[in-house]
Amino acid sequence: MANKTQSNKQRAKQLMQRLESHPGMLERMESILDLAESDGIGSFDEVEERLVEEVRRLGGETLESWLERREQAVGEATREEVPGTQQREKKR
C-alpha cells in the first residue's frame, strides 16, 4: 500500500510538471476536479452539462496543442530536407 501511495505521488508530480506547459489543460482539469469535489452546485443534469462542456474544451485544447507540435515538427523536418526553407505563419 505504501508503495502504491508513493507511486501515485510520483505520477502526480510528473503530471503537474507536464501540465505546467499546457496552462489551458491545467485550467480544464481544475474545473473538472472542482465539479467532482463539489456538493451543492445543482442537479445531476446541471453537473453533467457543465462536465460535458469542460471535456469538450479539454478536447479542443488538446487537439490544438497537438496540432501546433505537429506543424512545428513538419516544419523542422522540411527545413532539414531543404535548407533555406521558411515556414509561413498561419493566420489566426
Image (cartoon, rainbow, N blue to C red):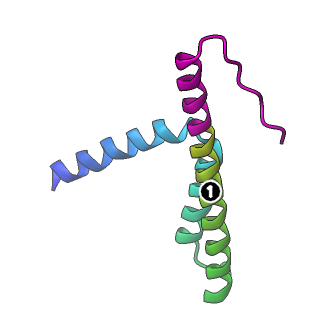
Q: Position of residue 39 (x, y in %)?
A: 58, 77
**Residue shown at 76% from the left, 27% from the top:** 88
Q: Is residue 21 visible?
A: yes
Position of 45 compared to 9: left or right?
A: right
Q: Position of residue 77 (x, y in %)?
A: 53, 25
Q: Secondary structure at mark 1?
A: helix
Between 62 and 25, the residue placed more toward the observer is 62
Count of numbered circles on the image: 1
Position of 15 compared to 59: left or right?
A: left
Q: Position of residue 21 (x, y in %)?
A: 57, 35
Position of 40 compared to 5: left or right?
A: right
- From which residue to which does the magenta span run? 69-92
Q: Position of residue 64 (x, y in %)?
A: 65, 48
Which residue in the protein does label 1 denote? 28
Quadrant (top left/top right/bottom left/bottom right) for the N terminus:
bottom left
Report which quarter residue 11 is drawn in: top left
Q: Is residue 43 visible?
A: no
Q: Residues within 10 Å of mark 1 (few under 14, many from 20)?
A: many
Quadrant (top left/top right/bottom left/bottom right) for the C terminus:
top right
Q: Residue furthest right?
A: 91
- Whether residue 85 is in magenta: the answer is yes
Report which quarter residue 71 is drawn in: top right
Q: Is residue 90 above or below residue 41?
A: above
**Residue shown at 57% from the left, 64% from the top:** 32
Between 24 and 42, the residue placed more toward the observer is 24
Q: Is residue 31 above or below residue 52?
A: above
Report which quarter residue 66 is drawn in: top right
- Whether residue 77 is in magenta: the answer is yes
Q: Amino acid at mark 1?
A: Arg
Q: Is residue 43 above or below residue 50?
A: below
